[in-house]
Image (cartoon, rainbow, N blue to C red):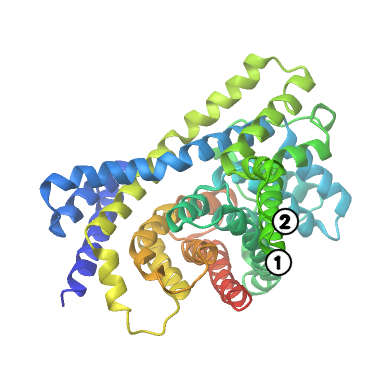
Amino acid sequence: MENILPLIIVALGVGVLLILITKLQLNTFISLIITAFLVALALGMPLDEIVGSIEGGMGGTLGSIALIFGLGAILGRLVADAGGAQRIAVTLIDKFGEKHIQWAVVIASFIIGIALFFEVGLVLLIPIVFQIAKRLKLSPLYLGIPMATALSVTHGFLPPHPGPTVIAQQYEANIGMVLIYGIILAIPTVIIAGPLFTKVIKKIMPDSFNKAGNLDSLGEIKTFKTEDTPGFGISVLTSLLPVILMAIATIVDLVQDLGNVGDNVLFDIIHLIGEPTTALLLSVLLAVYTMGVKRNIPMKQVMASAEESIRAIGMMLLIIGGGGVFKQVLIDGGVGDSVAALFADTNMSPLVLAWLIAAILRIALGSATVAALTTAGLVIPLMSGSGVDPALMVLATGAGSLIASHVNDAGFWMFKEFFGLSIKETFATWTLLETIISIVGLVGVLVLNMFV
């Protein structure tokens, strides 16, 4: 019973969090801090340690990711505001042609999704998808599902997105390995949940593919003449540079390990450049040049884009910090140890358990990032001595945190409104594709676990 009580307290805490956010319509960050206080008290934490735990959770979470998150937001905004993202999408769509249009949308969304956060990528790409659909006389949803799939997969699996980046830090995983495994996992997941799923659901729910959609909520959309945008190659390089630098550093690490080669100045420099913060800073500097200076855009205008991107993510940073606070209270209150004790005699893989807990929390809370962070607080004690690869734990947690997006998730309503769907149609398309991503992600992680 003593192992069950802390879990009951957590369940009640999640219930309180839901009431605060949905019924009382309190801000998510404030709701998380209130819930963390209440859960800490209920768990019997000493009163003089509660504030320290809360401050430690906030600082520990944001201390390592605020730089990555901020620089990532600036990079994405510079590429978007210069028309680089539009150039990537339009060029690929033109190259692939009408017959392979879905694959063009998938690749464009994947590249742009690495550089941009999910909501930003959605708002940026949807007008382009609608233009292409109109030009080719296709259903917007026929292109929208592959687009949303690629954006969602990058959001859940790949650094420098907030979820995988924060969880990698919590699990002490090598972020480069998370990136490499994440890309291996992302490719089949995007194919299955994107173009293949679209074919199946089109036969099951053909009426939803006849909807015209609605872009009114986007307001005035910034579009560019193609000749006024940066070149395709430089736009792709600028967007993917952080991924390329982190991947190079990880591959060098692997070569060193396999060849038993010691460090020297060259390897030290490569490792420094491959650190997420350094990789993103260099990418932002490149973007300032390629998306601004080189195109004769005044530095003041380029910096205005950078400042606007930070304003846009301020509340998101606080919410991530709030998730970190809740996670820290669970660890300091001994909940993680209770979970470890409860599953001590089970044969269930920590990977499956992390996915399962993240999935339950995602369905309850709506936020993938908060679900992933809370999961970390519960499963970190399970990892010691399990021999499981921390990078795979990150991906299992990320996959679980994407499952079954429904009415408590902003993404659900965005997808519904943009594509003009009914609630039932949104469940059959958006909720189902997110669930497919989650399940395929878990299967992929378990397969990878057999080889690493």
- Image vertical order of residue 42 relative to residue 279, above or below: below
Give, as a three-letter code, the residue at label 2.
Answer: Val
Residues 197 and 214: in front is: 197
Q: Earlier in the sequence, mark 1 or mark 2?
A: 2
Q: Is residue 224 left or right of residue 73?
A: right
The answer to the question of whether label 1 and label 2 lie on touching residues, with beta carbons closer than 8 A, is: yes
Q: Is residue 107 visible?
A: yes
- Image vertical order of residue 445 relative to residue 372, above or below: below
Q: Position of residue 401 (x, y in %)?
A: 46, 61
Where is the C terminus found, in terms of image quarters? bottom right
- Which quadrant of the view contains residue 217? top right
Q: Position of residue 293 (x, y in %)?
A: 74, 20
Where is the N terminus found, in terms of image quarters? bottom left
Residues 429 and 264: in front is: 264
Give, as a three-letter code, the residue at label 1.
Answer: Ile
- Which quadrant of the view contains residue 342? bottom left
Q: Which residue is mark 2?
A: 106
Q: Position of residue 392 (x, y in %)?
A: 54, 66
Crowdedness near tag 1: few (<14), some (14–19) or many (≥20) residues, C-alpha within 10 Å: some
- Which quadrant of the view contains residue 182? bottom right
Q: Which residue is mark 1?
A: 191
Residues 390 and 83: in front is: 390
In space, the residues marked 1 and 2 are separated at their CA atoms by: 8 Å
Q: Residue at x 61, y 58 (%)?
A: 177
Q: Residue at x 73, y 18 (%)?
A: 297
Q: Is residue 221 visible?
A: no
Callout 2 secondary element: helix
Q: Position of residue 103 (x, y in %)?
A: 78, 59
- Image vertical order of residue 348 relative to residue 322, above or below: below
Crowdedness near tag 2: few (<14), some (14–19) or many (≥20) residues, C-alpha within 10 Å: many
- Image vertical order of residue 77 relative to residue 139, above or below: above
